[in-house]
Amino acid sequence: MEKLLQYSFTGLAAGSLYALVALGIVLIYRSTRVLNFAHADIATLATFVSFSLLTNEYSFPVALGLSLLTGAAVGIAFYFVVLVRAQREGANLLGMVILTLGLALVIQGGVVWQWGAEPVSLPFPISDTKTYKVGLVVMSQLALATLAAGLVGSLLLYLLVQKTRLGLAMRATSENVMAAQTLGIPTRMVLSVSWGVASALGVVAGIFLAPALLLDPFFMLDPFLKGFAAAVLGGLNSLPGAVVGALLLGVAESLTGAYLTIQFKNTLAFVIIIVVLLLRPEGLLGKEFKERV
Amino acid sequence: MDLVESYAEDLRFARRPFTRALLGLLLLAVAAFPWVAPDYMVFIATLVALYSIGVMGQNILIGYTGQISFGQAGFLAIGAFAFGHLRIWGAPFFLALVGAGAIAALAGVLVGFPSLRLKGPYLAIATLGFGVAVYQIFVNWEVLSGGRSGLAIAKLKPIFGLSSTRYEYYVYLALLAGFTLVTYNLVSSYVGRAFVAIRDSDIAAEVNGVNLTRYKLLSFAISSFYTGVHGALYAQVLGHIEPQIFNIGESLTLFVAVIIGGVASIEGSILGALFVILVPKVFANFREMVPVVYGVTILVVLIFEPLGLFGRWLKTRLYFQLWPFR
């Protein structure tokens, strides 16, 4: 029982970060129908920016703020400079997905060039050795902070999308771009905001993951794939689905590691993807897209 | 300008004497290559030949059938390890090659089943998941992968007293020629047209009597057969395989080759293979810049030249054919 609770808690903490990654993926997917393969690399880049700032004695809030801005700026710039242009040239959806892949490769190479491929550790103000015991469960400070970051991030996104005018415009744009344009919504601005917010969410996940893992140019790949899996599990066009899927995935993974096999713990996410796609392709909370010929 | 007067002339591979002479010259150059170039260059040419086969297979799936797959490294690994085990059990080279291809094709059919229900990005994730899952299974399951030390594969025994580098070059070149011929005939047959119809609109294709299940699975099977053979040939040329070779980067490399070489073109596949082999060699001193080059090329190609290197070649050729008019 104690073990079960303990591993569930660890799973929830990991899941809350997957949730941030998944929310970013879903936000972009449902507004532009583009699956953003550069999500992980934007987050990696921004995390390295905060690494540079922190090692140069800047305070943590400054580093966090600047790296969030970096992530958002890269996302917005990519949308305006590359995607809008490609759309004008008549690129199809597949083309745009491949463009994000191109961006991913460019950033990856740039990060290796600037910071090297050697793993480094991020000087993080919150320790993972200081622990609190609540009931039967031992919680590290880092795990609590992670959980809090995930929840606050999701909550802020919820408020933005559901309670503001901008959120309304975002929802309208993702529902039907043409109609939104006709109603006078500046859809390009709105979509660029979606890209910026989504990238910033990924950056938060990256910064809170970095102290648990070591920071190297490929450290976000695994969490990113898990975020994908979570988004698919919850439904690629449903924001609440992304959170539910991510928490479920986090717990399932942690329990698999505890009770079944530690070696194949990471394979679980992909088994889940394939099973979900076969049984319920629209995910737990997603709606199926209908299409005309 | 050339005028096509009969159907037989239209089908002919090289129509004009000049083209035929150029083609002959190219073949001669390719055949003479290992006698004039240093061994290292011959080895690189061998790599290009075997990558071309894999890229062609990937192009059948992506370019002709329009199904994205990011899991090619999985098929590569399956092909390579199947080949390795078959060789260790004493199977001759060609039998092991066909066996590796067949096992990869079987895996392709299994992965193809989800593709019946999934489209676009969903399929991309599912295949990405497949690629990573295969990688992790091989890394963690030592009976299959030979553990940390990997599998060692015996070198081919050269005949006619050729050096082993030259012998491998000729064998791989012959295989590439065979696969190219098969692919040409495949894409201009009923099957190829069915693939293209599925790519352009699967529902319309189904309405017109293309059996989606059969042809999507067939496309996956053929493509993964090619990729399995690629894996096997790669294993043979390396002489030693371990699961770490077949990581997600390898899937991306094959994908990049298809996009840069030219979607839905066989010559483009070979150009793409040339590109992804030569770029890392040219940038050997700046390894970290290789992904940047790939990425920038993808961005440029997709925005300015959607047909890739082969499209550029077609345009250049057209320019010279029409010269001095434009």
Image (spheres, helix red, strand yellow):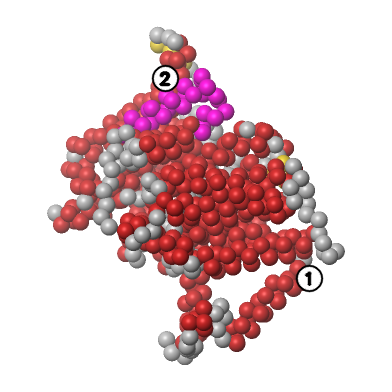
Q: Of the residues shown, which amino acid type is indicated by label 2?
A: Phe
Whether residue A67 is visible to the viewer of this picture, yes or no, is yes
Residue placed most toward the observer, A37 or A126: A37
Furthest residue in direction top, as rendered: A135
Q: Secondary structure at mark 2?
A: helix
Q: Position of residue A38 (x, y in %)?
A: 43, 48
Height in image: B145 above or below A179? above
Q: Is residue A44 left or right of residue B98?
A: left
Q: Position of residue A179 (x, y in %)?
A: 17, 54
Q: Main secondary structure of the magenta part?
A: helix
Which residue is at 27% across, 40% downward? A287
Furthest residue in direction bottom, as rendered: B324
Magenta-drawn stretch contains B72:
no
Residue at numbered disc 1: B35
Q: In the rendered structure, which segment of residues is drawn in magenta?
A: A241-267
Q: Name the chain under label 2.
A: A
Height in image: A94 above or below A199? below
Which residue is at 67% across, 52% downward? B97
Q: Name the chain under label 1.
A: B
Q: Residues within 10 Å of mark 1 (few under 14, many from 20)?
A: few
Query: Which quarter of the figure is the C terminus of chain A placed in?
Result: bottom left
Magenta-drawn stretch contains A253:
yes
Q: Do the CB atoms of the residues marked 2 and 1 lie less than 8 Å apart?
A: no
Q: Residues within 10 Å of mark 2 (few under 14, many from 20)?
A: many
Quarter of the image where one finds residue A43:
top left
Residue at numbered disc 2: A9
Whether residue A126 is visible to the viewer of this picture, yes or no, is no
